[in-house]
Amino acid sequence: MKINKLIANNLKQVTCQIEKDSSLGIVGLSGSGKSTFCLTIADETLKRIVTLLPKSEYRFLFSEKLFSNYSAQAIESLPLVFYLKKTSFSANPRSTVGTHTGIFKEIRIEYAKYFKKIPEFFSFNNSIMWCPKCKGRGTIAEKECPECLGSRYKKEINDFSIEIMKKKYSIIDINNISADKLLEISKFLNLSFSKIKLIENMIKLDIGYLSLDRKINTLSGGEMVRLLLAEFITECQNSLIIIDEISIGLDHNTLLKVINCISELGSKNQIWLIDHSKVVIDATNKKIIFGPKSGKNGGEIIEKELDIPQVFCKINESKVEDYYIFKNLSKRNINIDNLLIPKNRITSITGESGCGKSTLVKECIIPIFKKNYKEIPYEIIGQDKNQSVTSKSTIATFLDIKKKLEKYDKNIMDLDLVDVEPLLTRDKVLKLQVNMLLELGLGYLSFNRKIQTLSTGEFQCLHLVSKIFEKNSEKEILLIFDEPSKGLSQNILNSFMKILRDIIKHSKKTAIIIEHNSYLLECSDYIMDFGKRKESIEELKLIPSKKWILEFKKNFVCNNKKIASNIENKKGIEIIDKDIEKVFQKYENIFKGGILKNFSQTAQWIYSDYRYEGIEPVIAIDLENQLYSKNTFLFEIAGIINSIIALTHTNNVKEFDFYSKENLCECCKGTGKIETIKIDEIIKNNNKNIWDGLFYEDIMSALKKYNFTKIKFLFKEIKKIENYDLNKNYSEMSDIEKEIFLYGYWKNTFYDSNKKVQRRWKGIIYLIKKYMRSSESIFKKIIKENSEETRCPVCKGNILKHNIPLDVNGKDIRSIITSKIKENKTLLIKIPQIKEILEILDEDTFLNTDVSLLSEKKQVILKILEIKYASFLGYTIVLKNTLPFIDDIQKNINEISKNNRLFLLDYKKISCTKEEILEAYYENNKLKRTSYLYEIFGYKKISTIINKIRKEKVCQYCNGKGKLREENLYENIDITETPCSFCNETGLSIEGLNTEIEGISIKEWYYGSIDRINKDLPDELKNLSLMSKICDLNKEQLIKLKEYLK
């Protein structure tokens, strides 16, 4: 992989070349640029792959994950990259270990076969057998459901039990057992080889204790990454796997086991590890060191790692005066009669991963503490930041200092905290807060930094500062830290322990730390060690830290093995002209069911019909399918826009990301166009205002459904901010007032304190179009007839929502992308992609030309150009239907094949497109492209008759819909529909499927072949489905059918 002048956050034109056959350790101080470097590469991989799909598809499936960095366009020889970290997982409360891994789905299918039911019968995500009280969640308001006791099912589900090894198991029982116990009975459940391998990997990675019903959002960061790792070891090959902080949550012995498993993954993939653990980094073949320091003083690759010594504060060895006393602690494997926590001391709880540390603190100590010490507050520092903040939360909002900062220059929000400190002359407390953050080594952060982008350790430092500066900070408090070492380098850990030690020394606070980091354990006053994971913990001794650390060092085991790494060389071209459909389907399943489903939750839903157990770098494209959707601009093709931005060498990377949803105009959603109406056709009197007869009565009647109070509120707020009066007569409005009145005000939303919601003015045209849809007025027809597409009045067609200028050789970038190529040819010709574009299109072409309107041939040439400039490495690229275009694409196909294996799938001797065949033989005939095959033989309206029968004889499960509704299976998707397996999506009951039409059962009409009604057919046609349409046939079949019809 070649990286050339990469800029992102604090990265300063990073240039390097990384071999593909070495494992790599990525090290440096917190904030030095390690994660930014890796994340930028992973984001670029995702962008290059998904933007090969039609734009409408990739915007819908990946809009939340699609980011682009113009400087990353220069990365060459890019393999398939996966970045494994805690946030790779769904926070969906319905997602469990079983549903996430697919193990539970296989078990449901086995139960369904055994009891002759459908698999959905055994799902807790639909209403067939879910608990009606909690609707399959198992909890209500985060408490165990009293009806199903957390099982998620109706009681009747227990009637369906399978006997395994002389013991009966209901689906609830199977869902409750741990992975290691599940392995023992896996052969009786007919689990696939890949799922058994996955369970074995979970056990190897020391998470075999997880049960299938364990909610994904309750896993620790370490458990999450290891579960992902277990899946990738099972499934992934020929890819670059970047693992972020694999050491978090792991004791030393477990970490050694995990490193061995990573080496197994490295036998068929390349491995990069970001970590602060010396044990992890020493297991890699090579190192890249970021530094020299953090923030603006980092972001470079340096030769030598900074040697930061551990700084030990004096521990408190004096006699403990008082304890917090906890009796009868019982939860899962915890059964302790009596437990003492020394007051005003630092006590660390350690032990093997999964031994019960978090259970002890969060589910035993805290509930008893709340009950027995009501007057004493407690604080879990850093507890799951994703639940405590929103996606818009920043350091400023979290510390509740945003109003204070408004007194200063606006730029203060974007400055590093180290540069902010000297400017804070007006507020003593604010200065103290910033000083403490600097002391903790977080001077590289800014007030505008999003909370959800902080590492766990960074967030815990921030949370600690927020609590220290609350009112009554001197009072007695119990502070609880869950692995504060996560994501922090030694310099910050030194500062963290110094500050914590000072707090404990000078106040009545007590600290409990859940931790594996040996430095933090040595800095504690006392240790409680669970040791190895056990069935039952009945006693925990309080050990002085000095005594414990001596024993730990005595038993320390070193790791001398190196992690393997390998990406296979793939190159060359192979032409396939047999079983075209079958071969393409195989690779499309790998592409969509393997890679794309791993990129987003929405893709898992949309591509649910594509099934593949593995993950391989495969791209499959049918060149005769839709390649580009509406509003795909020429400047988006092959990274042209990023190459134009690169000519400026700007550091303003994020604002000029033309792919990020956050940067796109909110009015036109980044299309550059909006659907409008000729407003004069619905204005009654333009000398009136909206409240006094501007529009006809039918229009106002429809607008009432939106509620006039909301409109008046928004008009008032806009006048307050901008002094634009939208209540005045239309004819008296200025041009800008008319524009806002008609098309909306997109700079801000406004908080409606009465209803406690944010509101936005989207324009009167938007409201009229929305609320006239259900109207029976004549104006509904008038609006439809007078609708038209126009350039977006907000972004003026340049698709960005901001007006930040970007000068490119004396012109703003907006002017360049909305102009003809020839108007900026001297500048644009420096870009290699443009040189090739000019061989396809003339120089009078606008850069914002909609490429979906170009000829099929030109679209194909552009798509191959995109693949070439994606500069993939180690992929299998499958292209179907290349023959009609081969003369125009052969040169670039040869280029692509130097680093990738290409399969060209074409029907022998058919050099025309399917569209050409349909137009030539099926447009001027009685048979149309949409005709059913059965119509050839004189059968009429079979599908119409089936639809009538469906209304009378409906499927008992899906009620005739052919699909079952399932609740909230995927992130940000409330309801999904899954195919009903009982009726195979027909919507018909068994009786309905057996009903005959023209002597043939409906079941045969759906699943039978055409030779059922005509035996005199060539072999190539006789197996076609009775319900196929002519346009469903492939090119070979269309030509055979044409010959048969002759």
Image (tube, rainbow, N blue to C red):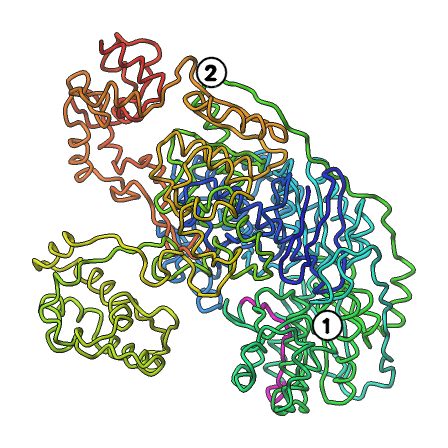
Q: Can residue 580 be seen in this view?
A: yes
Q: How crowded is mark 1: few (under 14 residues within 10 Å), some or many (20 or more)?
A: many
Q: Is residue 713 left or right of residue 2?
A: left
Q: In this view, does 583 lie to the left or right of 478?
A: left
Q: Find residue 699 and report its horizontal and vertical position in percent.
A: 13, 66
- Which amino acid lies under the numbered mark 1 shown in the image of this protein? Ile
Q: Find residue 926 and report its horizontal and vertical position in percent.
A: 15, 20
| Residue at position x 32%, y 43% in the image | 963
Which quadrant: the C terminus? top left
Q: Find residue 356 and report its horizontal and vertical position in percent.
A: 68, 63
The image's mark for residue 513 is 1
**Quick one: label 2 or label 1, which is nearer the N terminus?**
1
Residue for badge 2: 578
The part of the chain drawn in magenta is: 373-386
- Seen from the viewer's position, the closer of residues 562 and 555 is 562
Circle 2 or circle 1, nearest the eye = 2
Which quadrant: the N terminus? top right
